[in-house]
Image (spheres, helix red, strand yellow):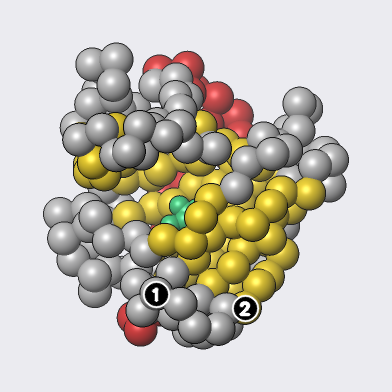
Amino acid sequence: MRGVAVWSEFLERAAQEAMVADLRDVVRAAPLFRPVTRWGKPMRVRMTSAGRFGWVSDRSGYRYEPRHPSGVAWPPIPASVLAVWEAVSGADRAPECCLVNFYDADAKMNLHQDRDEADFSQPVVSISLGDEALFRIGNAERGGSTESLWLRSGDVLVMGGPARLLHHGIDRVRAGSSTLLPDGGRINLTLRVVT
Ligand code: SIN
Ligand code: FE2
């Protein structure tokens, strides 16, 4: 879709469960937090990161930081997650950030570009776990036509090449559509090369 490679059902159920267990360790070390935009508005998703860098947003703006807001270093990216990058990215570099986004039933994410990284020749790999979400993808420029796709648990996307800077977002989450997470919700992981 628009140059985004879609790997439907890339992860089978057992692999999804193992990845969620790994992410529990990440969240224990670096708890989910709710960032605010540079205008002070709380974002709808809760976030944390693994890897050398984590993505943060606050009144100073959007950027990558080597530490969680609490001051602790981000935990390492789990091997189960790195394996997905190895399998699908086609990249010659390793990811330096795994951004973890948690969506509850009411969360969404406005259309945006991922452009806080230094090297746009490196792809972004996205992994979806838990409840289904309506993903919208547009253009490199603001505005214009968009297309939508339901992302399901275990689906993987690669935004690379001409698709690397397309606007994208999540319109809504379909609560209760997956049994993967005992308390419901959706996890999205995005793997990025930062430097
Ligand atoms: C993002 O663009 O950072 C998240 C996309 C998604 O949740 O699928
Ligand atoms: Fe994004």
Q: Quadrant of residue 70?
A: top left
Tell whether 53 sits left or right of 140.
left
What is the number of callouts on the image? 2
Q: Crowding near pointer 2: few (<14 within 10 Å), some, many (20+)?
A: few
Residue drawn 53% across and 60% down? 169
Q: Give, as a three-letter code, the residue at label 2.
A: Glu
| Residue at the outermost front position | 39
Evaluate whether residue 128 shows in this view. Answer: yes
Q: Give, as a three-letter code, the residue at label 1.
A: Arg
Query: From what the image shows, is residue 15 above or below residue 75?
Result: below
Residue drawn 39% across and 74% down? 142
- The x and y percentages for residue 53 are 24, 39
Residue at the disc numbered 1: 142
Q: Residues under labels 2 and 1: Cα distance?
A: 14 Å
- The x and y percentages for residue 93 are 24, 62
Residue at the disc numbered 2: 147
Residue drawn 29% across and 32% down? 58
Label 1 residue SS: loop
Query: From what the image shows, is residue 117 above or below residue 189?
Result: below
Quadrant occupied by the N terminus: bottom right
Q: Is label 2 in contact with label 1 (beta carbons under 8 Å)? A: no
Quadrant occupied by the C terminus: bottom left
Residue drawn 45% across and 32% down? 42
- The x and y percentages for residue 80 are 50, 44
Q: Nearer the viewer, mark 2 or mark 1?
A: 1
Q: Closer to the camera, 165 or 92? A: 165
Label 2 residue SS: strand
Q: Crowding near pointer 1: few (<14 within 10 Å), some, many (20+)?
A: few
Q: Quadrant of residue 86?
A: bottom left
